[in-house]
Structures are given as C-alpha cells and as structure tokens.
Image (cartoon, rainbow, N blue to C red):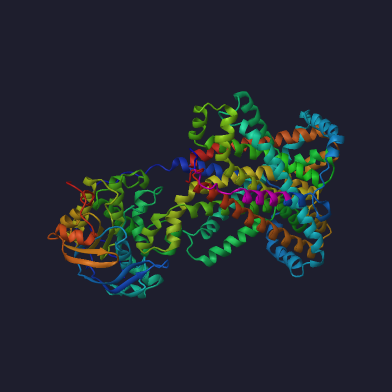
Amino acid sequence: MTLVLPPKPRTWPKTLGIAAALAVFTLLTCLPAIGGVELDFAAIAKNWRHGASKLAQLAQPDFSFLPRTWIPMLETIQMAIIGAAAAALVSVPLTLWAARPSNPNSVTRGIVRAVINVIRSVPDLVYATILVALTGVGALPGLITLFLFDLGVVVKLVSEAIDSDKHAYLEAGHAAGATQFQLNRALTLPQSLPLFANQWLYALELNVRISAILGIVGAGGIGRLLNERFGFYAYDDVSIIILEILVVVILIEVVSNLLRRRLA
Amino acid sequence: MSALPAPPSKARTTVWSLIAGLVILACLVFLDVDWGALLGLPRSTWEYGVLMFSDPTWEKLPRALFETWRSISMAWLGAILCVAASIPLGMLAAHGVGPTWLRTILRGIFAVIRAVPEVIIALILLTVTGLTPFTGALALGIAGIGTQGKWVYETIESLSDDASEAVAAAGGGKIAVLRWALWPAALPTLMSFALYRFELNIRMSAVLGLVGAGGIGSMLSNYTNFREWGTVGMLLIVVIVATMLVDLVSGAIRRRIMEGSRARGLVRSR
Amino acid sequence: MTNTAHAAGASASAAWPIRLENASVTYPNGTAALKNVTLTIEPGEIVAIVGLSGSGKSTLIRTVNGLVPVTSGSVTVGPHEVSRLRGRALRELRSNVGMIFQAFNLAERVNVYRNTLVGRFAGQNAFRSFFGIASPEDRQIALDALDSVGMLDKVWTRAGSLSGGQKQRVAIARALSQDPRVMLADEPVASLDPPTAHAVMHELTRLNAERGLTVLVNLHLMDLARDYTTRMIGLRSGEVVYDGPAASASDADFEQIYGRRIQPQDRLGAS
C-alpha cells in the first residue's frame, strides 16, 4: 500500500536566506578595506610563544608588591560604592517616571526613556576619557562615569520589570481618589523594592569591575597602577594586581548574593 | 474599639541602614576628590557641550564610519568566536551532560574569565597579535566565554526533562539526547543570547579601541587628547546612533526568535 | 468638603443616588461594552448587577467613578456629573465612592494599616504624602474602619499573608475609611470559598443597613443576588434585560439574563 503524504513544508529557502545573509555580513566584517578586521592567524602561529611566556610570567604574582596596591585598590572600592549609592538614589524617581504603571503620561515617559537610552549608548570608558578632559585626572571623572553607567542599567532594567508586572492596587488607589504621586510613594515603591535592590547590587558588582579599569584613562583607581606596571613589563606586579581585582570582585559578588536574599 | 496590637520592632532595619549609611559616608569622606570641580561641572558640561555639538566636524564622517564598521566587525567576529566556543563548553558544563569533574573545572574557568576585565585580556593578547583589531576581536571572543558559558549551561539546565527522557527511553545515548532533545529546545534561547553578546560587544569594542585595538574608540581617544571638540562631538553622535540602531535591530530579531519559539511550545512562557 | 471622622455604627454622611442616561461605552478596539443604558438607583438602595462575563458589568460599575469614561450619554452620582470631571474634581468625586474588587487589589508587600490608609489619600496634603506621615485623625479613621470589619488584630501584618476573605475585609475597611456616599463592589466574592463569600456579602448588607450607603454589587451567582440584595439589574451584551426586585427573580428570569439554561455553577450553595 502506498502512503499519501501531506506536502512537506519548505523551510529550506528561509534557512538558506538567513545563512546567506549571515555569511555575507561576516565576509564584510573581514574586509580591511572598508574597515573590517584582518584575520591574522599567521601572527598567532608566529607569536603564540610570546603570549604563552607572558601568561607564564603572569602566573607568578609578586606578593611583595601588595602594599603599594592598597591605596589605589581602596580608591577603586570607594568609587564603586559611592557611584552605586548615588545612582541608587537618583534611579528611584527616574525609574518611576520611565515605567507605564507609575507614569501614565506618555510624553514625560518617552522623554525619560529616550534620555536613558542615549546615556546607555555611550560606553563607560568613553565617558571617562571625556570627563578626564573636562575635570582633570583623579577619582571624580570615575565617580561620574560609574554614576551615569549605573543609572542607565538600573533605570532600564527596573522600569521594564515594573512594566511587565501587574499592579492591581493602583486601580483601587485611583478609585479612592488618590494621585499617582501618592500611590507611587506609598505603594508602588515598596512593591518594587526587591526589583530595585536586585539591580542596585548588580550595579555595585559591575562598578568594581569597571572602576578597576577606569584608571587606565586617568579616572582613578587601580587601573592607573596596572597600566604603569604593564608599561614597564613588570608582569609579576601586573599579575598580583589582577589577582587582587579578582578577589575583590568575588568578595563583592558573595556579599551581594547574601544581601539579595535578605532584601527579597 | 478592640485592642490595637503593638507595631513590629524596627530596630533591625534601623541598625542595618545606619551601618550602610556609615560605610557610604566613610567612603565619601576618605576619597580624595576635588569636590569643587563637581560644583563647576554643570557649567563646564554646558560649555563643552556647546563646543562639541554646535558645529560637529562632519567632514571627518567617512573616516568615522570606517572606524565604526571596524568596531562592529570586532564585535561581530568576537561574538562568533565566543558563541562557537561557549556552546560546546557550556553544554559540557551542564548537569547531566558531562562528568562531574569536567563540570567543576569548566565552571571554574568560566568564573575566572568572568572576573577578569576584558581590557586585561586584550592587553595580554597584544603581545601575541599586536595592536590590531584582530586582537580586539580575539579579546572580545575570549572574554565573553565566561558569561556566555554560564548562560548556556543555565539554559540547558532550565529545559524540561520530557524530551530528554523520551529520547533516552527510545534507546538513545548521551549524544542522541543532545542532538535531538536538548539542541532543538535550547536553540532559540541560545541564538537570542548570541545576539545579545553582539550587542554587548559593540559597547565593549569602543572601549578596546581606547587601549589601541582600533575602531571608533581609538578615534575618540585621539581627538579627545587633541582637544578637537568638534570632532569629538561628531564621533559621540555616531557612537550613540550606531549603538541605538544595533540595539533596535538586534532587540527586534531577538523578540521574533523568542516569540516564535514560544508559539512552538519550546520555551515555557512566564 | 471635609470628610468628618465618625465612630463605627453612627450614621454616615447622606448617601447619593446614581443615574445613568443613555450611557454607552465603546472601547478603542471597537467593542461596544455598554449600549444606551438608562438606570436610576435611589440613595440607600442595595442593588445587584447580574450577568455573565462579557455582559458589561465591569464596564458599567466603572463608569460610576469614572475609571472607564462613557463615550456617549451621561453618568451622575449625587450632585456630580462624572463625565464632565477631570483632575482634582474627579478625585474628589472618587473620594466619596468606595470600591472593592474581585482580586482585592491590595499592595501585597505593604501592611494592612498602610493599605487601609489609601482611603484617606484624597484629602492628604503633599507634605504628608511625601514623608508618609498620616495625620492623627486619618490614623484613627483607618484604625476604626479596620476595627469595624474585625481586622484590627492584623493591622501590622503584610497584606500578602492574609487569606482571601481577610483581604477583602481590609479592602472594605479601605473603602470605609473614605467615609463614602456610595459603595461599588466588582465581583467581590468571585475568588472566595462559599462560607467566606457569604460572610463578605453579609458585610455589604450590614453596611447598607447600618450606614444607609447606596451599594452597587456585580455578581454572577443567582442565589447571592436573591439572598443579599433588594433590587436586581440583569445585563446581557451591554444592555439591560431585567430590572426588578431581587427576591422574586425566577429561574426563568435568570435564563433570560444569561441567555442560556441555568447550570450548577450559577449557584453558590449553602453558607
């Protein structure tokens, strides 16, 4: 008995189209003539020993260098904490303005969202570079960079979370004759606090990683020392600094996880 | 009126708030910062803003676009490298796929890579491949493995066991389970994460440019040092527009992928 | 207009009538939820609005306090024509209309006291609102309201940890603390088990009897309408198909309202 099959759906033209588009895009990214990347695998073959030897040097940290790193590392941590705290404060009104349930006015909501999107589109080191030119070398440009970066992250993520939640209590509040401001202050804020706390702690974790680097462009923290030692080819010093950054990052992640559980 | 119960004690929250406040205060006091400069900031922001945006140097736009494509290329190739490496490694690091010792080692490697900032990985690679965009792409590729690998094994572990059990019950081995049960179910989410990695890389590539890997970041760094604010303004506009465009397009594609997979029942909708 | 404090059980401010004239509501997506409804509800009446889901009950009850605006026709509550009000005037009207909901609509992470206090927000000044400090009078009104529904012992508990019946009673307290002239209840017992549902319906009847409040309740269960209200309005597809005494409504009347035969789930059962 011969079976009569239904016609098989033809998905291959679509898949082929997508694959072709991806291939063309990738090809364009490899053309140095229009700005693509020149894939220099030969360099890897030739120089991998350099990298390997550097890695080997990096695997031997010089612990005696540690005392010189305390103050810059402390500055890094201070910048991270202050930046996160300041951003946390300012993020509350901005987030409530950016979310639909807490701000029914689509004009002001649109403006806040647009501003936040622009702030998020500028990478952190770009802010740092320009701010250093504005205010001079030191921790201040680093602080402001972290503040702006954190605002971008927190406002976007928390406002999206508020948007996707249900807020039935707001209908009851409006029915009782309350203003949006009263309801936000008394109800929306406590209800969203776990969302905020989560993102504030995430911002703190990010800050430590970023502020370790900002020093490279002169915005304070241990980055400057790192860059300097790298320039002197003192890889054992570089190694201990990297190790230190790693330890601090892990510590902050642990503390942050603990706090997250208590605040949820 | 019946008896009003006593309000709960606020002592604990007060103590913790005080501690947090003290920590922040201590950081503020002991940080060596020129607070005077902060007060002058709104004014200088306005002045420099005017310098940058009142007459941007559009003549240099072709060069800016060239460098932007360089940054995008670094981001794209880095994303491909990262995804290509993190998918197999991440799968092996998932519960129920590879042996426990392998899982622990891989997760440890992911954690270490995650903790090391991308710039440092770039600096190390400089010694091998030199101050080129290729270094930037490699750095982005390697640095991303930490986070991407974690997302891969978390995705695999969040899949329901139904399909895997079905394949195993029919007599399939580990590889068959991977190929026929896990891979199709995880694919939409993994593709979505791959695109997100591209979005993240775009931002990172500007940063790498600042340490010399090329791209729009290095152009920005140079002209900031030359204090040519007109060009800096133009470059900022280009960066903002390019980043927002990539976010828009990539975000839309990601939404379509996830919607399609939700419709086909592959992803548990929240 | 001052909201006067009052001890539980004393007569409330005089109740208001509700009048709809040719009220129609068409949603932006084209759905006609209400079609030319004309109704008059006298002060102090307790009225049930009965109908299936989609009959327009929720829309109707929300036109009374302006949560849903009418697209044509008018709604008058007491001296106010709702359709004309905006901003502060609308909020003042709403402060005189209490409302409870099927999903209780409490803020789960916030305690019972603060949830009840929401009823006093309409008269609270900006300074107090910003710092979250209620006046002593408002505090007493909220506590009295909680006491009158028997929830004072839970005053500092998080609303989320209460049972359904308890939440609804807190919601009633919130509405009571407004010292309202009208009480609206949108399917207040649909999420509650039979004994609790009867308790809450009893509470509404008590409010109507003791304070003389005008009460409007949305219900989809026939026996609750018959047992607890004096007048019943049947809605079907946005139109009034029945308006008469609740106790004498027959099964045939209900079948006409529902547009189908009566089924077991249309009755709640014994308390």
Q: Is residue C78 left or right of residue B177?
A: left
Quadrant of residue C224 within the rendered picture: bottom left
The answer to which of A115 and C150 lies nearer the viewer is A115
In this rendering, does residue C201 appear at all?
yes
The answer to which of C126 and B198 lies nearer the viewer is B198
B170 vs C241: above or below: above
Chief secondary structure of the magenta portion: helix
Residue at 60 percent of width and 29 percent of height: B175
Q: Position of residue C68 (x, y in %)?
A: 36, 66
Q: Position of residue B21 (x, y in %)?
A: 56, 46
Q: Position of residue A65 (x, y in %)?
A: 78, 32
In this figure, what is the number of numbered marks? 0
Q: Is residue C251 left or right of residue A166?
A: left
Residue at 75 percent of width and 63 percent of height: B233
The answer to which of C31 and B93 lies nearer the viewer is C31
Find the magenta span and give its range. Answer: A4-23
Residue A119, magenta (yes or no): no
In this rendering, does residue A219 appear at all?
no
Q: Position of residue A263 (x, y in %)?
A: 49, 42
B147 vs C21: above or below: above
**Residue reaching furthest left?**
C248
**Residue reaching furthest front?**
A1
Q: Is residue B189 left or right of residue C165?
A: right
Residue A6, magenta (yes or no): yes
